[in-house]
Amino acid sequence: MKKYIIPFVFALVGSILGVFIFLTFLAPDFIEETPVSEQAKYVYYDKPAYINPEFSFAGPYNPVDFTLAAAMSTPTVVNIKSSSKVRSGYWIGSSEEVMSTGSGVLVSNDGYIVTNNHVIEDGIKFEVSLFDNREYKAELIGRDVSTDLALLKIEEEDLPYSTFGNSDSLQVGAWVIAVGNPFSLESTVTAGIVSAKGRNIDILDGEYSIESFIQTDAVVNPGNSGGALVNTKGELIGINTAIITKSGKYEGYSFAVPSNLVKKVISDLKDFGFVQRGLLGITIEDINSDLAKKLKLKKIQGVHVARVSPSSGAEDAGLSRGDVIIGINGKEIKTLPELQEVVATFSLGDIIEIEYLRNNRRMLAKVTLKDSIHKGLTLNDISSEEMKSLGFEIRDMRPEEVERYGTDGLIVPFVIKNSRADQVQLSPDYLITHLNKERIYSKVEFLAKLKAHEGTIMLDGFYPGFEGDFRYTIIR
């Protein structure tokens, strides 16, 4: 027994001596040299530890705080009342006024408001209520069916407004809040996370519709449309637009137009009254497993070029059928909605760099975005001096349009805001049949007669889908 006592005593003394030396000489230096972030100091030393009774682990309790984001965004979200007239009864001309409501977001201190097109599309009068209950009549500046966005304006200064965040940098799983007026409950704030990006849910009609929604699980209900989707910094990163539901109420899926796309659309609506939509000039489809196998792709992602339009920017740059687009301006492209969203943020005449695969070889091409309506020409190319002075453009009708409308003439593709044409309320899609009571069949003929004539001009024509003829008199 004695032979074990002496070694045990030496071991005990050595342990005590080691602990004494560490606490006296080494521990202070170790603690001082160990880097601790300011946030960590705050969490661990200034807040009590949170202990979950179900586990033996003790750690800091640091919940996400939405109060700052809510305080910044709530005053910028408005209530929109849109009045429309619908036919009532059996008497000709009898109608009644119908009121619908939605939300909008102030995006400038002088009263510009972005909302959804479906909130105001049938409206003839618009009223806006602010966070502090001030009420204003609003003017419709422009709307874009392809993205379901619209821009209103109230006459006021020094208003609170939301600043745009970068929706491209938004990550799946990030916290967001939705601010709006569901069921006419003003200034309602709900929270959730980003569930997915680049969602296409097939709710928008039209050849050039763009669906690349941010999906969240923040609660959104009728009346939230046009409201703000905001990150934890209080930045506007989307406009709440739609829900998927069987009951007509929220069931866990809400969708918002990304802020980068919103910013481009409302900028064009503000400057031109319409959206300058630059096109690549290609027909595209998503890559699926069968197509990836056929093209011998390593990954099932990218956008397949099924067709290239003649004289388009894509054809000029050398893109061909069978190419697979995988990037634009350094941004990775995995799906068709992603490609549509990115291209839609650029303008007519912009040059973008396309990265694509051809026989599994990476290639680059610089593509000038053109407008297929104008036969591949840019805005500067198609505007003659005579038409610039009037403020609208014309183009020849296509054969299928002549057949569809039962007549030929000229189409007005766009009207410049605040121009002479705009002042007499000439609108896009007007079909011109006569200039100064003379029958017109081509753009060349129109321009020749316009140049030979001085003074006031008179246009006769109609709008496809609307009854009756329309006449416009424009003073030159």
Image (cartoon, rainbow, N blue to C red):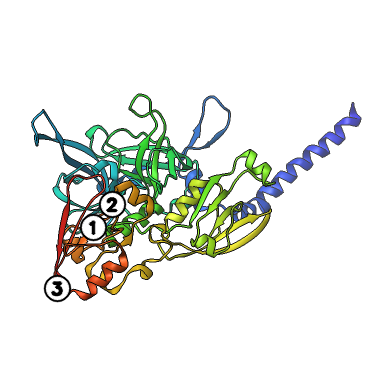
Q: Position of residue 299 (x, y in %)?
A: 65, 45
Give the x, y percent position of residue 332. 56, 53
Can I make out residue 124 in this image? yes
Q: Is 86 or 79 nearer to us in this picture?
A: 86
Q: In this view, does 15 lie above or below 138?
A: above
Which residue corresponds to the image point at 20% horizontal and 37% vertical from the top-left?
Answer: 100
Can you identify the residue that label 3 sits on? Answer: 455
Q: Identify the disc placed on residue 141.
A: none
Above or below: residue 49 compared with residue 136: above
Q: Which mark is residue 433?
A: 1
Element under disc 2? loop
Q: Distance between the residues labelled 3 and 2?
A: 28 Å
Which of the two discs, 3 and 2, sits closer to the camera?
Answer: 2
Q: Residue at x 17, y 40 (%)?
A: 84
Quarter the N terminus occupies: top right
Rendered view: 238 above or below 308: above
Q: x and y percent of residue 169 in the render?
A: 48, 52
Residue at mark 2: 407
* Dot 2 alpha-carbon crowd within 10 angstroms: few under 14, some 14 to 19, many 20 or more: few
Q: What's under tag 3, amino acid-wise?
A: Gly
The local secondary structure at tag 3 comes to loop
